[in-house]
Image (spheres, rainbow, N blue to C red):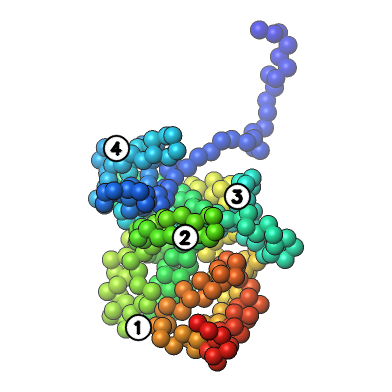
């Protein structure tokens, strides 16, 4: 050993790069269209690998209610874990960004609009990348005290992001109205409810050579919520997260204090989640562009769609808008006011009989 103690001094480690990891990462399994049995591998759903199960302090051989022990094949590798036909998620934080299909380089949400303006030919190299910090009810019920990280790409990320923004968002918005009518201030947050997520039936998604048959994340929450208070309360009562988790200084606040720094690393390249942009409609979060076009632009397109498709129920119209935007190679969550204006004009022409259905 050399007597030259070249590296024997003290070093500050405040800025040292350390490898950090989540206790568990919950993966989405898109099903197996070649499967011959009615089982988890064929249907799809959330998959928790065995390492994550152990990191949560749980026994891999004793799955919670609603989960099954599974061994899935990923390429040449087989991995054991738990498959969840249905999981209930409390969404603590959510961030959506973009990833280059070839280089895997990650970009913030504004990248889509930037490329659309300056380099449209490169748009097909982008795919969505979603990060979700969540507590899973099925895991919490058997003693897991730590959250899990959900990461999804492409069509899967768009599907889950839509469930959170539209279905869960509608739930929180209606609950907030009830709260305010009772004379209480403040909003009911998304994390006050368990979002049930399960696999939709296998369906073909994508375009051109990039099509595949997969099961997307879906939910049992209705697209149209009950309009009467009694019906709404009956729907949401089983989905309420225990108050001890959601109160100031409660379990979710304690989780956030423990995972704030790690989340900042994970979501560094993505847009900030359910935050100021949604708390103050039309106002983007600091240094971020709005998640979507202003409501009046989208509402104009929805009104035009109602005229063009009078046979459809109102709750089916948002899906029509999304499909029409996708046919124009516009990601619905990145559509601009001008995109909605052009779409509304086309729908009005269709309603007037200028276009064929």
Quadrant in the picture for residue 171: bottom left
The residue that disc 1 covers is 227
Query: On the rendered structure, is 294 left or right of 180?
Result: right
| Labels 2 and 4 touching (C-beta < 8 A) | no
Residue at 36%, 77% in the rendered image: 225
Q: Nearer the viewer, mark 1 or mark 2?
A: 2
The residue that disc 4 covers is 59
Mark 4 or 3, nearer chain start: 4
Query: On the rendered structure, is 174 left or right of 346?
Result: left
Query: In the image shown, does 33 or 101 lie closer to the viewer?
Result: 33
Mark 1 or 4, nearer chain start: 4
Q: Which mark is residue 101?
A: 3
**Badge 3: residue crowd in 10 Å (few <14, some 14–19, many ≥20):** some
The residue that disc 2 covers is 205
| Labels 1 and 4 touching (C-beta < 8 A) | no
* Image position, residue 203 (x, y; %): 40, 60
Query: In the image shown, does 289 or 298 lie closer to the viewer?
Result: 298
Q: Nearer the viewer, mark 2 or mark 4?
A: 2
Q: Which mark is residue 172?
A: none
* 91 shown above or below 21: below
Mark 1 or 3, nearer chain start: 3
């Amino acid at each position: 050993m050399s007597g030259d103690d070249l590296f024997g001094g003290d070093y500050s480690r405040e800025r040292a790069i350390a490898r950090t990891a989540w206790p568990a990462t919950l993966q989405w399994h898109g099903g197996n269209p070649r499967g011959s049995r009615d089982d988890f591998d064929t249907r799809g759903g959330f998959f928790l690998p065995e390492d994550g199960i152990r990191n949560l302090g749980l026994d891999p051989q004793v799955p919670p209610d609603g989960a099954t022990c599974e061994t899935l094949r990923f390429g040449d590798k087989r991995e054991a874990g738990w498959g969840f036909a249905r999981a209930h998620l409390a969404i603590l934080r959510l961030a959506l960004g973009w990833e280059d299909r070839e280089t895997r380089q990650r970009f913030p949400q504004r990248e889509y609009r930037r490329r659309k303006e300056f380099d449209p030919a490169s748009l097909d190299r982008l795919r969505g990348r979603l990060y979700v910090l969540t507590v899973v009810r099925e895991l919490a019920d058997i003693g897991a005290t730590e959250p899990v990280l959900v990461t999804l790409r492409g069509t899967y990320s768009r599907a889950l992001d839509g469930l959170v923004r539209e279905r869960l968002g509608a739930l929180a918005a209606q609950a907030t109205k009830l709260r305010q009518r009772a004379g209480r201030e403040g909003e009911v947050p998304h994390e006050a409810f368990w979002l049930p997520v399960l696999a939709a039936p296998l369906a073909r998604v994508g375009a051109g050579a990039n099509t595949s048959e997969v099961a997307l994340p879906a939910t049992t929450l209705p697209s149209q919520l009950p309009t009467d208070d009694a019906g709404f309360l009956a729907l949401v009562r089983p989905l309420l997260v225990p108050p001890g988790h959601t109160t100031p200084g409660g379990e979710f606040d304690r989780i956030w204090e423990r995972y704030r720094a790690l989340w900042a690393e994970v979501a560094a390249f993505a847009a900030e989640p359910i935050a100021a942009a949604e708390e103050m409609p039309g106002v983007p979060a600091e240094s971020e562009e709005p998640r979507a076009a202003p409501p009046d632009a989208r509402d104009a397109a929805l009104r035009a769609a109602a005229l063009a498709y009078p046979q459809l129920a109102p709750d089916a119209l948002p899906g029509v808008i999304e499909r029409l935007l996708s046919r124009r190679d516009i990601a619905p969550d990145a559509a601009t006011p001008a995109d909605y204006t052009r779409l509304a004009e086309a729908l009005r022409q269709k309603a007037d009989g200028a276009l064929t259905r």
